[in-house]
Amino acid sequence: MIIAAADGSALGNPGPAGWAWYVDDTCWAAGGWKHATNNQGELKAVLELFRATAHVDDELLVQCDSQYVINSVTKWMPGWKRKGWRKADGKAVMNVELLQEIDEAISGRRYRFEWVKGHIGHELNEAADVRARAVAEAYQRGIAVPSGPGWNARVETDTAASAALEPVVPEPALVEPALVEPTVVEPALIEPVDLGAPEISITAPELDDALFSLDEVAEAWHSITLELSTEELDRLRLRAQADGVSPEDFLRGLI
């Protein structure tokens, strides 16, 4: 889908006037007259956009801030044509020449209009408005008219290339299995977990009264409580894990 904005501008309305359609900074066009109305600029912008994209098969989304233009093309024009380009009151339709040219330009085309509120910072609409007004000001000042680069072939080339691009899937037979080295996780890479000031209770046989000054019978089992810092507990767990035993059994082995 091609998304483009179309806008017109007239200083004095009628007065020096301009029109512009805009896709991006590399793809836009503008023009105008020494004396015309804003509605004529709005219609001419739409007409020239359809003419510039006549050779492109993509659907065209026209963003426009003129409800007059949108309603004229999408709602009122079929009735006007049936009445010989006259309104319900029998009066001639204004700007009929531009409307007839638009009617011819949109024949067989895939398109739709989207109304956008003007002058609120809408990116494409603002870009078209700036260029249409620049043309009107150029006619007012009698300087060169900024007409723009016109339709950029890069847009349709990129679209066609994207449509033709198909994913390439390598055949399984051509993919050799990779040798994967086993990953060894060093114990030091395990980050310590802060569990506060832990206490580990162990039950040990045959404790030496001289070492621990315990007034218990030598043959009995004794309970010892150790207070370890988080760092000490982590080292204890790592060493016990390396030996494949619990921290309590590791301590018993040290004793």
Image (spheres, rainbow, N blue to C red):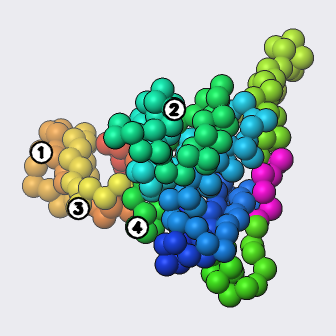
Task: Check residue 210 for magenta coloring.
Answer: no
Query: Left or right: where does residue 118 sit relative to residue 226?
Result: right
The answer to whether residue 243 is above or below residue 68 is above
Q: Which residue is mark 3?
A: 197
Does 152 appear in magenta? yes
Q: Please say whether residue 75 is visible from this viewpoint.
A: yes
Q: Earlier in the sequence, mark 1 or mark 4?
A: 4
Name the secondary structure under disc 4: loop
The reply to whether dot 1 and dot 3 touch (C-beta < 8 Å) is no
Picture quadrant where residue 121 is located? bottom left
Foreground: disc 2 or disc 4 = 2
Q: Which residue is mark 1?
A: 217
Residue at the far right: name it: 174
Label 1, label 3: how far apart the Cα atoms are = 31 Å
Determine whether 9 is above or below 208 in the image.
Answer: below
Q: CA distance from mark 2 to mark 1?
A: 122 Å
**Residue 55 drawn at (x, y percent):** 79, 35
3D distance between C-alphas at marks 2 and 4: 38 Å
What's under tag 3, amino acid-wise? Ala
Q: Is residue 201 left or right of residue 11?
A: left
How far apart are the two marked residues, 3 and 2, measured between alpha carbons? 95 Å
Q: Which residue is mark 2?
A: 84
Position of 49 relative to 118 (above/below): above
Q: Earlier in the sequence, mark 2 or mark 1?
A: 2
Q: Residue reaching furthest bottom?
A: 141
Residue type pointed to by label 4: Ile
